[in-house]
Image (tube, rainbow, N blue to C red):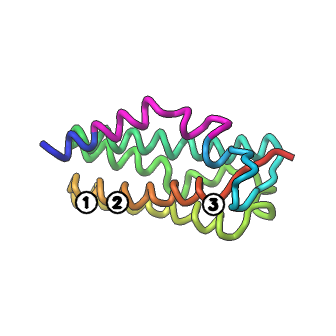
Amino acid sequence: MQLKTISIALYTLLIFSPSVVFSQDSGLNTNSEDFKGTAIYLTAVEREAVLSEMRGFVESTAGIVKGIADENMEMVTANARKSGKKAGAHMPHTLHKKLPASFKKLGSDTHRRFDELALDAEQLGDVGHALSQLGALLDNCVSCHSLFRIKVR
């Protein structure tokens, strides 16, 4: 099945490339002088909270991809729900003033897309639709890592 092959390839990429997402040299964490996007200055604790939320996104995504590969929509639903709107409730209140509106909007949309994926996976049970939704959701991740850098102050 072609869908299963694509899902397994994406899952493999996510599992074996965590350093791409979370290393000091990754998109959101790079202190490159060539970067033209927005630098966000946070405390070390605030930075870790944001990175922890992103790690949750990656963990959910890995579970979603595995669920799609196995055609297990219950797994897709459960993993998508982990990163829905409720997942952001633990964030430090100090971030509200420090994060640019565009960053918060992108984050909120990402949580919303996880919730939508969970609901559709549960109600429709369509692996192709779930994979399409996941692709659109991952565009948010790419945008965020392209537009923002978190720096500790």
Q: Quadrant of residue 8?
A: top left
Name the residue carrying label 2: 133
Type of secondary structure dominating the magenta stretch: helix
- What number of labels is visible? 3
- Point out the residue furthest to the front here: 34
Residue 10 is one of the magenta-drawn residues: yes
Q: Point out the tag, 2 or 3, that comes first from the N-terminus.
A: 2
Image position of 6 (left or right of 85):
left
Q: Residue at x 43, y 32 (%)?
A: 15
> Please, what is the three-letter code of the amino acid marked with disc 2?
Gln
Considering only vertical position in the picture, is 142 above or below 106? Answer: above
> Please, what is the three-letter code of the amino acid marked with disc 3?
Leu
Q: Point out the tag, 3 or 1, that comes first from the N-terminus.
A: 1
Circle 3: is it few (<14), some (14-19), or many (20+) Cα within 10 Å? some
Residue 142, percent from left and from top: 51, 55
Image position of 43 (left or right of 86):
right
> Please, what is the three-letter code of the amino acid marked with disc 1?
His
Name the residue carrying label 3: 147
Tell me which segment is drawn in magenta: 8-25
Residue 92, percent from left and from top: 75, 51
Front position among marks 3 and 1: 3
Q: Residue at x 12, y 42 (%)?
A: 1
Image position of 47 (left or right of 15):
right
